[in-house]
Image (cartoon, rainbow, N blue to C red):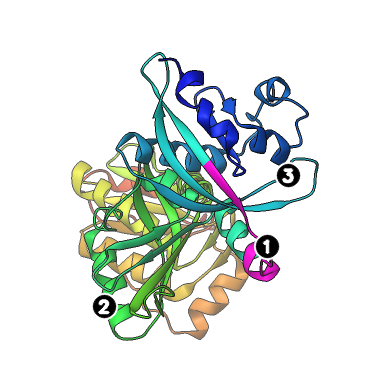
């Protein structure tokens, strides 16, 4: 018996009933009451309507409903339709019906709702259409409700366990809820499309259906922002490396021109790369050229110089500006083991004169006059 024959008796009902195919986004069959509800004029006109202009979240909701009815479930849902531009609020009973080709389509039995609370209605629709992931869970992490965005990210879930790449996040959410406190953090979640970063907030609440304690979890995708931050950090590291290159000038000597400011972050980056190079290549002299430096944090500079000396490298400064010289003098900086020369040419010449494993380089000889 074909579908039309099996459903022929439903034409006599005053309740709108139609069969919807989520794969083609069309109504395949409708009774006369459904045609009137949709203000279609005729069954044929209603079957020609294209319902495919949907948001991703609406498609997700339909897919989830389809999966449920294919498992034999009967769903009761409230939804709004707009047959002539004006909203009609319905309570729909959704169930599966076999098509002539063996596939399962969605049968909808619709009941018009009157006296709807408009504020509540708008709140429900906003939750359904928002891109934010909204989930209501028990204090043990069992899922009570997922909005379409949450279902799209995680699939229809029985528990929030496994949602977070770091299991400690789940533990903190549950612990904070037990303490009647809010949890908030930027965390990585395991979605159906792979790991993504989400700003996650959870807060204790109550299940409006039972009054029992519950946890409301809201999540906003910040993956693009997180990747941008990571890219900026990587580019900053590259810029820092380019602004403090290490140049091998022979005689087991390195030159490191300092360009820009030398603050704590720069000093840490320079120390990490420079000290490792000293050990690996048995560097004996390090020339720090401050000709292109704009601002120097003296404590960080002194810390770097002490680290060089502890590794057996001879620190040589050149291109020191008057402002830095004044700070070093005013702070009575311990520079007894540090050679300070006018420019890079003199500093390299001092390293050449000393030679590898030679004596400490001395300042260039001054010209003398007389007999």
User: Is residue 28 visible to the viewer in this orientation of the structure?
Assistant: yes
Q: Which residues are magenta?
A: 109-121
Q: Position of residue 348 (x, y in %)?
A: 42, 45
Is 65 in front, or is 320?
A: 65
Q: Position of residue 93 (x, y in %)?
A: 48, 47
Q: Which mark is residue 124?
A: none
Q: Position of residue 107 (x, y in %)?
A: 48, 35
Whichever of labels 1 and 3 marks the residue nearer the N terminus, that label is: 3
Marks 2,3: beta carbons within 8 A: no
Marks 2,1: beta carbons within 8 A: no
Question: Image point 68% across, 70% down: which residue?
Answer: 119
Asked if residue 14 lies left or right of residue 209, the reply is right
Which residue position holds label 2?
175
Asked if residue 42 lies left or right of residue 107, the reply is right
Question: Image point 44% across, 75% down: which residue?
Answer: 208
Is 34 in front, or is 80?
A: 34
Question: Image point 59% across, 35% down: which residue?
Answer: 12
Q: Which mark is residue 82?
A: 3
Q: Quadrant of residue 142?
A: bottom left
Is 220 in front, or is 235?
A: 220
Whichever of labels 2 and 1 marks the residue nearer the N terminus, that label is: 1
Magenta includes 353?
Answer: no
Q: Position of residue 176 (x, y in %)?
A: 32, 79
Depth-wise, is mark 2 or mark 1 nearer the camera? 1
Neighbor class of circle 1 (other Cα within 10 Å; few <14, some 14-19, many 20+) is few
Which residue position holds label 1?
114
């Amino acid at each position: 018996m074909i579908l039309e024959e099996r459903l022929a008796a439903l034409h006599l009902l005053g309740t709108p009933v139609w069969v919807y195919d989520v794969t083609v986004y069309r109504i395949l069959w409708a009774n006369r009451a459904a045609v009137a509800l949709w203000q279609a004029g005729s069954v044929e006109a209603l079957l020609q309507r294209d319902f495919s202009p949907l948001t991703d979240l609406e498609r997700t909701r339909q897919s989830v409903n389809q999966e449920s009815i294919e498992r034999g479930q009967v769903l009761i849902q409230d939804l709004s339709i707009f047959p002539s531009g004006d909203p009609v609020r319905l309570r729909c009973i959704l169930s599966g019906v076999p098509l002539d080709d063996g596939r399962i389509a969605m049968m909808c039995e619709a009941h018009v709702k009157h006296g709807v609370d408009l504020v509540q209605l708008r709140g429900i629709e906003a939750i359904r259409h928002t891109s934010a992931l909204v989930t209501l869970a028990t204090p043990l992490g069992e899922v009570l409700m997922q909005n379409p965005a949450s279902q799209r990210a995680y699939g229809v879930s029985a528990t929030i366990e496994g949602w977070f790449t770091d299991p400690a996040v789940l533990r903190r959410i549950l612990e904070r809820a037990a303490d009647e406190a809010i949890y908030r953090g930027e965390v990585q979640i395991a979605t159906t499309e792979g790991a993504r970063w989400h700003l996650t907030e959870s807060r204790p609440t109550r299940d409006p259906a039972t009054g029992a304690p519950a946890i409301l979890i809201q999540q906003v995708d910040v993956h693009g922002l997180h990747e941008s931050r990571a890219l900026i950090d990587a580019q900053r590291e590259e810029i820092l490396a380019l602004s403090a290159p290490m140049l091998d000038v022979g005689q087991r000597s390195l030159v490191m021109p300092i360009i820009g400011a030398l603050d704590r972050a720069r000093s840490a980056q320079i120390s990490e790369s420079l000290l490792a190079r000293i050990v690996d290549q048995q560097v004996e002299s390090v020339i720090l050229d401050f000709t292109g430096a704009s601002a120097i944090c003296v404590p960080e500079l002194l810390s770097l110089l002490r680290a060089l000396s502890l590794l057996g490298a001879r620190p040589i400064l050149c291109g020191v500006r008057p402002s830095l010289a004044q700070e070093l003098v005013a702070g009575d900086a311990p520079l007894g083991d540090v050679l300070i020369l006018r420019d890079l040419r003199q500093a390299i010449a001092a390293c050449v004169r000393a030679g590898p494993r030679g004596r400490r380089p001395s300042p260039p000889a001054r010209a003398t006059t007389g007999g």
